[in-house]
Amino acid sequence: MRARVSWTLVLAAFLAFPPFQRERVMEMGFGEIFRIERMRVDPALTQALRSRWDTEASAFAFPWGHMIPSLEDVSRITGLRVYGRAVSGYTYPCYHDLAERLLNLPVERRSSLVPRVALQESLGLYEAGKNAGENEDEYFARLARVSRRELASQPGPQADLDLRRFLVLFLGRLLFATRGDTVHCRFLPLLENLGEVGGYAWGAAFLAHQFDGLSVSERQTSTSGFYPFLQVWAYLHLPVLGRGDLTQPGLVPIARRWDSRRDTRHLADQLERLQEAIDSYPYLDVVWQPYLGEGDEGQPWLAQARPYFGRSMWLHALNLVLPLNLFLTQHSLGLRQSVVEFPVRDRFRQPGRSFRGLHDTTDWRERAREQIENWERKGKGVRSDAITDDAYLQAYALKYGGKVYKSARHQVDVSGEIASLRALLQSAVQDREAAQRQTAELVITGELERVRGTGAGGASSSRSAGGSPSLLEARLAGAVLRAEEAQRHLEEQERDLELTHEHAMELQSERDKFRGEAQTTRSERDQLRIRAEAAEAQVAEMARELATLRLQRPPGDQEEVTRLRAELLAQRTLAQGLQQIVTDIGRSRSRSRSGASVSRATGASVGQYLAGSSSRRRNEEEERRRQGEDSAQDGRGGGEMLLPPDKQEGSEESGGGQ
């Protein structure tokens, strides 16, 4: 809410000025800003737009193409003047002497920042805090009342001093605000002669500052600068997003008509929904020219600003010298978008945009002389002779692909590549059709007409021409051959694109197959974990049985105990192996079908081994129990001795035979 507080302070100081001072501010081209009511900040919308800003092109990269805020947007939305001298001049490593002379305020040595508190106190805004139980209107009225007591009411040196202090606060905390709690003095040299302040193109400097602010990190969520501009720009060009309410139609500048809708959801939730809404935005609902029905009534500044509309040029804000690449959005001028060469990162922005610390005194009128001359010539008009947008869309898809999508459901590059290939394929098909039409027109209306005209001219003239019909026929055949060759080339290109498209589809199907295999692997891992737990339970049960046998068996059965102990050790080794298999499966990211079959075979063999081991253990227990019963019978029967089983069977056979 820092931007909202700055807006309240600046507006209160402006209304506290006596009428003659307010009139001077109006003449400087800043008056329309203060007619805009305090709008609610929408940080989610600002952050969503910032995430789509391409610093190299100085433009928004949306799924449907580039879009750029223009000088006409600045003029109609804010009322700032975009015509006049470029905001350029000297920048200094220290503004101490200049601030003491022009502001009568302390600025630290080797610094360019004036303390915000001292600046507010000089304007009577030292009681900037909001009292308990005080609503917005009461707070605003109190600020204006207290400030009015501190400001000079008559023209003179003190009134000029108050006006300079106000302009420094206005430029440093509202129009060209930066992060932090201090106010920069970089525009102070331009305020020495108050009569010349209104001759600068402050609206163009404001647009350069907006471009620079959009180039910061996407993680920055705080709002700086005159935030209603970008919000209203989005309301006008992307109305389906539904972030603004048109509360007062017909007012000028246009920012006075709108207010931000209240959204109580968490900022991250708002941002995610906005990203998805922009990704799925219907292209036909993008408003490229929102001012077609707008007149100039009540906006006298538009007459002088109109020569600057529809032109690509350099924008100046002292050390910020940034391009307005309006040729990237010819749609916004009612033209067909022709194929263009996309800009690359420009090196002119050095030595950077930070003024904290020391740097040399720089004359930007000399350093940026070529760009200043470009501004004075009003840049270069945007022209287009394209009949379709296909070539531009093809180049745009190749450069950006799926990177223009920001929501979670559009982060797969395969989809973006497929979309790019489809755009290329469609463009190639259209080029082939256009070549076929041109060939047909050339054959029918061009060369054939020449042949007929030559034949109608008479045989004598034909003979005197040295066989010109044959020459024309050869030219016609050559043209047809060239057209056929071009058509074959386009067909080959189309086949290559189709093969590439099929390859991309195969990649996507393989990705889906790998996802299915990963799901199967996860289920197998769960089954193995269950088997490992069962094996561990069996090991525990065998350990308990071994302990019982140790207590019940006589000392002579040590061999049996040793064998059971060895079997228990084997079971433990098997359980550890199963646990290691589960761990390896969990660490691996993907497995082939052969690996999955091996794991299934391993699981089956483990189950068979466990089943055989359990059956063998039950047989041995039954054998030991039968031997125990025989021993008991030996104790009861005295000296009676039984024959071995084979001897008993032989006796029964011999007895039966007798």
Image (cartoon, rainbow, N blue to C red):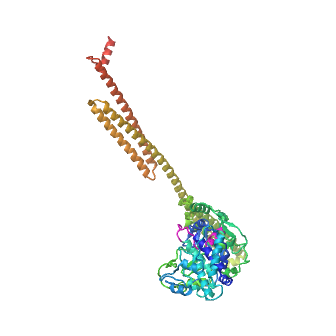
Left or right: 638 in relation to 574: left
The residue depicted at 56 percent of the width and 82 percent of the height is 187
Quarter the C terminus occupies: top left
Q: Main secondary structure of the magenta part?
A: loop
Q: Give the magenta range.
A: 216-235
Is residue 20 visible from the viewing direction of this image? yes
Residue 586, placed above or below residue 97? above
Coordinates of residue 353 in the picture (x, y in percent)? 52, 77
- Within the image, what quadrant is residue 259 found in? bottom right
View extreme (top): residue: 658
- Within the image, what quadrant is residue 482 found in? bottom right
Is residue 437 visible from the viewing direction of this image? no
Along the viewing direction, whichever of 482 and 626 lies nearer the viewer: 626
Q: Is residue 655 magenta?
A: no
Coordinates of residue 443 in the picture (x, y in percent)? 67, 69
Coordinates of residue 574 in the picture (x, y in percent)? 37, 42
Coordinates of residue 321 in the picture (x, y in percent)? 55, 79
Q: Is residue 219 magenta?
A: yes
Residue 629, placed above or below residue 424? above
